[in-house]
Every structure is written in C-alpha cells, then in structure tokens.
Image (cartoon, rainbow, N blue to C red):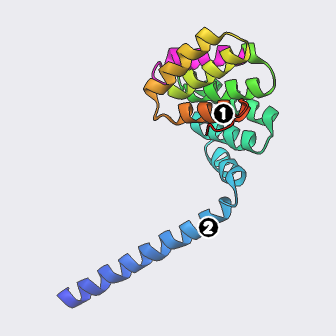
Amino acid sequence: MTQKRLIYIESVVLVSLVLLFTGATYQRNFAWKDNLSLWSDVVKKSPGKARAHDYMGIAKYKSRLINDAVKHHQLAINIDPAYPYPYVNLGICYFDKGNVDSAITQFKHAIQLSPRNADAHYNLGIAYGSKGLYDMAFKEMRIARMLGSGQQWKKLVKGIKGTMPSIPGHP
C-alpha cells in the first residue's frame, strides 16, 4: 500500500469518527433542555446508579417537586448506602418540609460517612439553629467554615444580615 493511499484511509477514518461524535453530541443536546430532562435521561440510561438518582433528586428539588426529590434521594441511598451526598440532600428536603428532626438525622448520617463534608456540617448547623440549639449550630458552622471554601459562611452571613435591622450610619 502506498504512503498516499494510507494517508487517505487514515483521513477518511478520522473524518468519520469526528462526524460520528458530532452527531452523538448533537443528539445529547436534546436531553439537555433543562436539568429535569437531562437527569431523567441519565436515570433512564443508568437506573442502578446512586449518583444519577441523587442528581435527579436535586433537579426535582430545584423545580420545587420536593416529594419526588425525596423519592430519588431515598433510592440513591438504597442503591449505595455509603454514598454521603444523598443523605445531605434528603436532609435538605426534610428540612424544607418542616421535618427538622429527620433532617438532623440525615445530616448526622452524612457526617458519619464523610466527616469532612462541609455541606453536611453547614446544613446541620442551620437545622440546629432552627431548633434554638445555638451552641450546637455555631459549632457546626465553624466546622463547615473550616472545611469549606467559605461559601457556606458567606450564605449564612448574608442571611443574617438580611434578617437584622439596619443601624443608621452603619453599612
């Protein structure tokens, strides 16, 4: 086989692969209309993956479909009980539904699985604070601040500033 013919064959194969992957990417874009459609597609294709159900739960939660979110987070936990993030997300759902004690249980479980999970500590602190357990809340917030990037602390401070009366002459 001549060198020229070999280059031609390699070029045809390369162009074919590029076209194939371009088509696959184009098709995938239809699934990504929004987070719900994307994660529905992922769950349909990977029903046995905990992460898929956890992220589907997050998408449902963000769409204010809390009961559906709870189901997906519980399913993620059933699939992989050692995966800590669904516990945090399930706790957030319970908290929003007013079931603070169940939320606390979920956050604590996430911390048992992943002691350095800043989100779990942050949300546990919020839950404790909502029950008036301020010493425990501040302890968890300090841990979250130490472990996290500071985003949880910034959210907390912003929330506190939003509920505090303003003092004339003070920013």
Task: Mark 1 vs mark 2: give the one in front.
Answer: 1
Classify mark 2: helix, strand or loop: helix
Q: Amino acid at mark 1?
A: Lys
- How far across and how far down the image is residue 77, in percent? 63, 25
- Give 109 or 120, whichever is nearer the viewer: 120
Query: Relative to 41, is 68 on the left or the right?
Result: right
Crowd rating for badge 2 (residues with CA inside 10 Å; few <14, some 14–19, many 20+): few
Which of the two labelled residues, at mark 1 and mark 2, occupies the earlier sequence position? 2
What residue is rendered at 66% in x and 14% in y? Answer: 128
For disc 1, the neighbor class at 10 Å (few under 14, some 14 to 19, many from 20) is few
- Badge 1 is on which residue? 161
What kind of residue is marked 2? Answer: Gln
- Residue 59 location (% of width, % of height): 70, 44
Q: Residue at x 50, y 20 (%)?
A: 142
Of 65 and 169, nearer the camera is 169
The location of residue 155, given as percent across then percent down, is: 60, 35
Which residue is nearer to you in this view: 86 or 49? 86
Q: Which residues are magenta?
A: 102-117
Residue 8 can be seen, yes or no: yes
**Residue at x 48%, y 76% (from the top left corner):** 19
Check whether the beta carbons of the residues at disc 1 and disc 2 lie within 8 A of each other: no
